[in-house]
Image (spheres, rainbow, N blue to C red):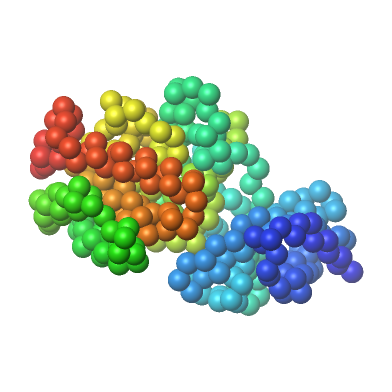
Amino acid sequence: MARFQRVCDLSLFSKFDDSAVQRKVAEFNSACGQPGETAYTCIHKSGFGKRAQLVFSLVHENGQSFALKCDQLEEPGWLEPEFRHLQRLQAHFADDVRLSVTEPVYLGRDGTFHVTRFSTGQTATGMYLRASSPEQAAQVFRRAGAWLHKLHELETASEDRFHTGWIFDEIDTALAQVPDDGQPDARALGHIQRLSEQAEALQGRTAPSLFAHGDFHGGNLIYGKGTACGLDLAYAHRKLGLYDVVDFLMLDLLKPASPQDLGAGGIRQHHVDMFLRTYRHPVPPDLLAFSLRAKLMTEWAKLTARAPAEGSRAARRLAEIRGRLAHVFTPAPHASHDLAQHQT
């Protein structure tokens, strides 16, 4: 008979249905022939759209560790495709012992949960924050580029249109939530105008469309000794591979940067170069610079709406982004990186 032990009851993770989780763990243990006690701990909670994602670490008394992902709303539509992506990618990554994706183990009968092997190691985010030298920090980006290059090899690339309208929709939506006394000043509005002008110059351009991760940030890549393991394919689909590159490079924001270290996109140029050293799919430089600027601008707009309620951490991030935007939208001696220089 299966026995359960709820290990943590932190306030952030305490509001979930214990009985539902226990039923899922029992189903998994039964299907895998694992009698005995299983301890479970809620380690992640997030929501987006119609999803209410919960992730639990499972530790069986036999010493095996797993991760159970479920939807608190019992929505089955997105978990099975993620599980199938992980199955498909096992063979794709098998020829390189340094690179992998988390191993899928069990898909719930009703499609509302799945179980994978628990990936041990340090997240790319954690490794970046703990890096004791610029060289160590740069290696985080080099290793991520190698992993993403492998993922993007899964399917043959095709050319697709580079769209920009959604960027300004996101900015407008975020700024509409800012109270009247917190509206952006003329300088910030000038940044948006310059970004819009740059977008006009890129209309009609194309870039490689690939099987993309869809949520490629530093928390979804686990580093071991010379290894990198990707997690969370819940948003994976075919789209411009450029967006995965941009998402990961935003990790650079977690440490303050000197203006002289920044490239045209507002990210440390050395980190961009190290990422592209191992990510060898075509990345048009002007589209990359524009997309990084656009990502900074959308982050700025969202934080402008949220920061007053989120405390000092959000305020520091907002200040860092403001500084970088001021740098990239102010005429400066980095003409070699200027968008116009890279247009084809």
Q: Is residue 283 above or below residue 199?
A: above
Q: Which of 10 and 50 is in front in this view?
A: 10
Residue 66 x %, y %: 70, 54
Q: Is residue 82 above or below residue 242?
A: below
Q: Is residue 84 above or below residue 268?
A: below
Q: Which of 319 and 62 is in front in this view?
A: 319
For image coordinates 43% across by 28% down, the residue present is 138
The answer to whether any part of residue 155 appears in the image is: no
For image coordinates 75% across by 60% down, the residue present is 9
Q: Is residue 293 above or below residue 10?
A: above
For this orientation, the residue located farthest to the front is 181
Q: Nearer the viewer, residue 322 or 102?
A: 322
Residue 164 x %, y %: 21, 58
Q: In this view, does 343 lie to the left or right of 18?
A: left
Q: How many marks?
A: 0
Q: Quadrant of the rendered structure where residue 324 is?
A: top left
The answer to whether any part of residue 221 appears in the image is: yes
Q: Nearer the viewer, residue 152 or 128?
A: 128
For image coordinates 73% across by 51% down, the residue present is 65
Residue 123 x %, y %: 56, 41
Q: Is residue 190 left or right of residue 88?
A: left
In the picture, which quadrant includes the N terminus? bottom right
Residue 62 x %, y %: 84, 51
In the picture, which quadrant includes the C terminus? top left
Q: Is residue 289 left or right of residue 27?
A: left
For image coordinates 54% across by 51% down, the residue present is 231
